[in-house]
Image (tube, coloured by chain):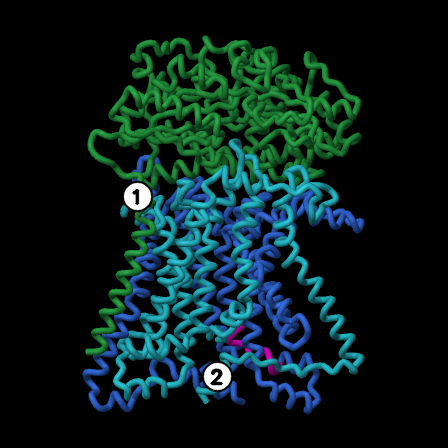
């Protein structure tokens, strides 16, 4: 008898615990459907910049005012380093966003047929003016003549200069004839005079080797063939490019070595290669300039970091999401977005137009670093299975960052590591 | 002597020992049946938890390992033994297994040696002993990620450790950028953070060693070393076994340290199996191969545990 | 005999006799001991001290060479940013409530199962115990992909359910059950005999007799479980994708600027806030903390 009573008490306790559990997490299990006729849209982004998010929300509010069926549009900031993993997990976990920013995941998404083709919708939208799009920036997101993502940001890489550090080391740059060798020479001098870093390829961190395309493109090299099937890391031009970097680190000491933290925007280095959009990190604590990328043996080259926005097929509201995308990217809104993201529209691409909303860079800088570069810029290496190629390539390249590395041999090993993935 | 008897006494009172026997004799049937029912109900939540959240998922993992999987579309494609064949073809796997072995052995050996050493040093009464026990235990309560982040700072080429070394005229290595030192760094980081638990367990075991035994041995003229190896160690060998198992299982699961500190680099030197599984399954989206690797990890853990269980007969004192 | 064991569990004994200060060799040894302990303590103490001190430094000073412990120009910028950048207070609450809940469920489930495995006789008990122990040996990485799919089918991705359920019923709980069983097994049989004579059933014996005696083991279970949940990293990384639902370890690694650059001072400030309360509780309650663990019946 007593046992039964006690068991009941235990069961009641267990039930109470279960209720606490559901009470505590009940509010978290959102994301489900609300009533019929109400549509909630969610777009994953990797920016956490308040001004950028405010602009997106403003555009979304204007859209909602005209579209009563849309109850909310949220912009979900995911951290950039884990953006791809998180987005993939959300899609695989049945918690797919309706729209998503995409960087190097785009090829995978297109190849697995996970994106909604946009061309027809955009062409049919009155006033959208599809022909305004620049061909060179849409190619990465186009497959079989169909556009799968709108390249809302096309940010060329430029060379940021810390004029104060250069002055301290009694160095000057000649923007018209700046070469990589010259940058290394000045960087070396700055390092000797001040102990600060010479030039830093931002975000490379001896891991994200794709950003080194900003250097090797000037040497005439590329990571793989145009069709993406053959590795070209073992080409002579690539060897020259990496020899240059290796010498810069270990001979000239013009590039901080692995494991050394040197942040240009905190005043720790003379130069940095970074996208124009990073100008927002300049806090005015030193005099700066922004120049196009230095020339290599193969002359001037422009390199582009791109971001696109697309609609996922796994969205529950594909039509509504596509309609919102068309609104978000129409000429009027594209002009607003242009203050943060170099636009893909020819009509918006002039230094003067870009400078109206840019507090850090002037019209001449934007003309030379952005507008003049876009037409024949190459993008950072992009391929299907980006994470695996990145990891295999990184693992092989690690051998490069030692004083006595055999450049040619390491690059050959990069090819043998990533060739099977390219051929897939 | 007390310890010996109490311990065997404790063991005697294991599951088969008839407890509450007199009461049972009276109404034998009802009571034992009712007891059995209560027993099942008592273990039910735990048993269900293990069945649903451990054993069933292992079965699913076996199923996944026979398939390829497109995460974006959710399509499953039966491929049979392909993922197992890939184990043999994977050029990275031998290096990963090597790193896993070095990491696990390094952590276990260092952790147990240091844990025991600290316990011996702190198993006496002197001013500040509580302070030191607390201090050596304190990293255990610090979150792994926070702890590892801080070590990450300190281990930068221009970070705190090399800065201090520079002050005394030593040019420190670039810790996280070369294979050997990176491995040393992750092992030490892991050991310093977790050795407190082992230290406390050894402390409690040492306090269970009766001092009369030591005194008797000392009267017989045994050296301190001799006393330690032939009296103390055998007496605390059950604790040694337990800490060894807990530490090995813990080392094989060390994910956060690697993810935060080295991301497996340089050149795979710190890519342990657990991190590799995560990479394959969640970064490369190759769930089939990730599951296959995970099952291999499970096999290793099982073999190691069985081995230790067998070995304990040899080196654990008073086991029957 | 058995009573003696139970008693000793609560009374830590010090085996070395107090050294007489007159003994010179002993003084020498004592000094050597202090020196050794202080040197060994450095890697244990310095990172925490440095973390707390550096969280008040301006960004430019964190990597200053030569390195400093304390700064001349302390700032709270990192702390402010920690809250601005992510819903840090919310994430803090998530970690706390999940850890508390998990600890409560685990204490309940493990003390029940531990008691039954140790003190109740039922057919198949050894086999069932073995099955439960498997839960301790299967690394979470083996089960995480299938678990992800299971929770996905239940619509529980991006909720706290997986963190609560798996942690409170799988691996950490199995360790707890093991600890409880080891503790209960060492208690004397007379306890039950007396209780039976008083007419108590198994539930009564468990609740009224054994649980009150099990405080040291329960506190060890509580400590280990709380820390296991508090430190969980892989699971939240996999299951949770919205910052509002993040737990602290996961949130800590997300202090990067819009382009992935690390926000060092903010990370340190957030890490300090994660560590400080637990460390403070630990310092206040360290005696129970360490001794609870020592007397957990984990002696083997």
Residue B309 visible here: yes
Q: Nearer the viewer, residue A281 or C36?
A: A281
The secondary structure that most of the magenta stretch takes on is helix
Q: Residue at x 34, y 56 (%)?
A: C165
Residue density around tag 1, few if under 14, some if 14–19, many if 20 or more, within 10 Å: some
Element at label 2: helix
Give coordinates of residue A265: x percent, y percent. 63, 29
Q: Is residue B142 left or right of residue A59?
A: right
Give coordinates of residue B61: x percent, y percent. 35, 52
Give coordinates of residue C213: x percent, y percent. 41, 78
The chain painted blue is B
Q: Residue at x 69, y 22 (%)?
A: A287
Q: Is residue B53 left or right of residue A377?
A: left
Residue A124, placed above or below residue A226: above
Element at label 1: strand
C-alpha separation, residue under disc 1 versus residue under disc 2:
60 Å
Give coordinates of residue A284: x percent, y percent. 64, 25
Q: Residue at x 25, y 85 (%)?
A: C199
Reply yes or no: does residue A244 show up in magenta: no
The chain painted cyan is C
Residue A234, placed above or below residue B306: above
The subunit letter for the residue under badge 2 reads: C
The subunit letter for the residue under badge 1 reads: B
Residue C7: numbered disc: 2
Per the rendering, the colour in which chain A appears is green
Residue B115: image quadrant is bottom right
Residue B51, placed above or below residue B117: above
Residue B295 visible here: no
Magenta stretch: give its range. Answer: B230-241
Residue B238, placed above or below residue A204: below
Mark 1 highlights which residue? B78
Residue density around tag 2, few if under 14, some if 14–19, many if 20 or more, within 10 Å: few
């Amino acid at each position: 008898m007593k046992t039964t009573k006690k068991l009941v008490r235990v069961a009641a306790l267990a039930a109470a615990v279960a209720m606490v559990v559901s009470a505590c997490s009940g509010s978290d299990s959102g994301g489900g459907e609300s009533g019929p006729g109400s549509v909630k849209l969610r777009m994953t982004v990797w920016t956490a910049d308040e001004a950028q998010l405010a602009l997106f929300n403003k555009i979304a509010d204007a859209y909602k005012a005209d579209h009563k069926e849309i109850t909310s549009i949220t912009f979900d900031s995911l951290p950039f380093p884990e953006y791809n993993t998180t987005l993939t997990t959300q899609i695989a976990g049945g918690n797919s966003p309706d729209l998503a920013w995409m960087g190097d995941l785009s090829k995978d998404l297109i190849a697995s047929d996970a994106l909604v083709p946009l061309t027809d919708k955009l062409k049919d939208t009155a006033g959208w003016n599809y022909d305004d799009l620049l061909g060179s920036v849409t190619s990465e997101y186009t497959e079989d003549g169909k556009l799968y993502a709108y390249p809302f940001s096309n940010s060329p890489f430029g060379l940021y200069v810390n004029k104060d550090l250069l002055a301290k080391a009694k160095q000057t740059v000649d923007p018209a004839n700046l070469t990589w060798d010259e940058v290394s020479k000045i960087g070396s001098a700055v390092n000797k005079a001040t102990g600060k870093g010479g030039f830093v390829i931002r975000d490379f961190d001896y891991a994200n080797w794709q950003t080194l395309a900003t250097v090797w493109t000037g040497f005439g090299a590329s990571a793989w063939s145009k069709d993406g099937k053959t590795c070209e890391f073992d080409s002579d031009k690539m060897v020259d490019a990496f020899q240059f970097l290796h010498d810069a680190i270990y001979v000239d000491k013009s590039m901080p070595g692995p494991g050394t933290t040197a942040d240009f925007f905190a005043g720790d280095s003379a130069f940095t290669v970074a996208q124009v959009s990073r100008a927002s990190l300049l806090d005015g604590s030193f005099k700066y300039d922004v120049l196009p990328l230095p020339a290599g043996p193969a002359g001037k080259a422009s390199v582009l970091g791109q971001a696109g926005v697309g609609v996922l097929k796994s969205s529950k509201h594909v039509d509504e999401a596509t309609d919102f995308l068309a609104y978000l990217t129409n000429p009027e809104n594209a002009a607003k977005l242009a203050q943060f993201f170099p636009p893909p529209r020819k009509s918006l691409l002039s230094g003067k137009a870009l400078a109206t909303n840019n507090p850090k860079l002037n019209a001449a800088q934007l003309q030379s670093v952005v507008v003049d570069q876009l037409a024949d810029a190459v993008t950072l290496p992009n391929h299907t299975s980006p994470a695996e190629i990145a990891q295999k390539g990184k693992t092989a390249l690690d051998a490069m960052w030692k004083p006595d590395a055999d450049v040619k041999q390491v690059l050959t090993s990069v090819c043998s590591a990533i060739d099977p993935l390219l051929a897939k | 002597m007390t310890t010996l008897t109490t311990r065997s006494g404790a063991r005697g009172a294991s599951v088969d020992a008839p407890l509450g026997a007199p009461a049972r004799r009276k109404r034998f049937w009802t009571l034992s049946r009712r007891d059995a029912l209560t027993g099942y109900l008592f273990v039910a939540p735990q048993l269900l938890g293990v069945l649903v959240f451990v054993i069933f998922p292992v079965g699913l993992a076996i199923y996944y390992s026979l398939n390829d999987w497109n995460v974006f579309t959710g399509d499953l494609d039966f491929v049979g033994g392909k993922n197992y064949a890939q184990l043999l073809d994977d050029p990275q796997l031998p290096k990963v297994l090597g790193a896993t072995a070095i990491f696990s052995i390094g952590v276990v050996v260092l952790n147990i040696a240091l844990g025991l050493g600290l316990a011996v040093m702190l198993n006496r009464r002197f001013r500040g002993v509580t302070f030191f026990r607390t201090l050596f235990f304190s990293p255990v309560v610090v979150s792994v990620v926070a702890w590892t982040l801080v070590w990450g700072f300190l281990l930068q080429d221009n970070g705190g450790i090399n800065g201090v070394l520079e002050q005394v005229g030593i040019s420190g290595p670039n810790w996280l950028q070369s294979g050997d030192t990176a491995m040393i760094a992750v092992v030490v980081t892991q050991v310093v953070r977790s050795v407190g638990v082992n230290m406390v367990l050894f402390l409690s075991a040492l306090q269970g060693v009766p001092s009369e035994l030591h005194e008797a041995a000392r009267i017989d003229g045994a050296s301190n070393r001799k006393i330690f190896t032939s009296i103390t160690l055998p007496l605390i060998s059950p604790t040694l076994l337990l800490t060894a198992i807990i530490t090995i299982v813990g080392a094989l699961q060390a994910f956060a340290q690697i993810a935060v500190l080295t991301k497996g680099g340089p050149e795979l030197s710190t890519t342990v199996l657990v991190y590799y599984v995560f990479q394959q399954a969640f970064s490369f989206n190759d769930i089939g191969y990730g599951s296959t690797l995970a099952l291999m990890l499970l096999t290793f853990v099982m073999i190691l545990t069985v081995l230790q269980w067998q070995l304990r007969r040899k080196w654990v004192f008073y086991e029957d | 005999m058995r009573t003696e064991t139970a008693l000793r569990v609560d009374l830590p004994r010090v085996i070395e006799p107090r050294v007489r200060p007159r003994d010179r060799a002993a003084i020498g040894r004592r000094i050597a001991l202090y020196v050794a302990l202080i040197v060994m303590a450095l890697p244990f103490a310095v990172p925490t001290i440095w973390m707390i001190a550096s969280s008040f430094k301006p960004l430019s000073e964190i990597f200053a060479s030569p390195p400093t412990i304390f700064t001349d120009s302390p700032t709270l910028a990192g702390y402010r940013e920690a809250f601005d950048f992510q819903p840090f207070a919310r994430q803090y609450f998530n970690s706390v409530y999940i850890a508390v809940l998990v600890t409560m469920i685990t204490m309940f489930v493990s003390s029940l199962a531990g008691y039954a495995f140790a003190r109740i006789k039922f057919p198949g008990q050894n086999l069932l115990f073995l099955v439960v122990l498997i839960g301790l040996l299967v690394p979470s990485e083996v089960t995480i992909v299938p678990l992800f799919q299971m929770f996905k089918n239940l619509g529980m991705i991006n909720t706290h359910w997986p963190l609560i359920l798996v942690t409170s019923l799988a691996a950490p709980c199995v360790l707890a059950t093991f600890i409880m069983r080891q503790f209960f097994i060492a208690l004397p049989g007379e306890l039950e005999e007396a209780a039976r004579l008083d007419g108590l059933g198994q539930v009564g014996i468990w609740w009224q007799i054994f649980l009150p005696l099990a405080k040291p083991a329960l506190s060890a279970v509580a400590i280990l479980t709380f820390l296991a949940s508090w430190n969980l990293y892989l699971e939240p990384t996999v299951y949770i994708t919205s910052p509002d639902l993040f737990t602290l370890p996961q949130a800590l690694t997300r202090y990067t600027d819009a382009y992935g650059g690390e926000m060092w001072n903010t990370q340190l400030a957030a890490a300090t806030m994660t560590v400080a309360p637990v460390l403070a509780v630990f310092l206040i309650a360290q005696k129970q903390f360490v001794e609870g663990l020592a007397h957990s019946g984990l002696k083997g």
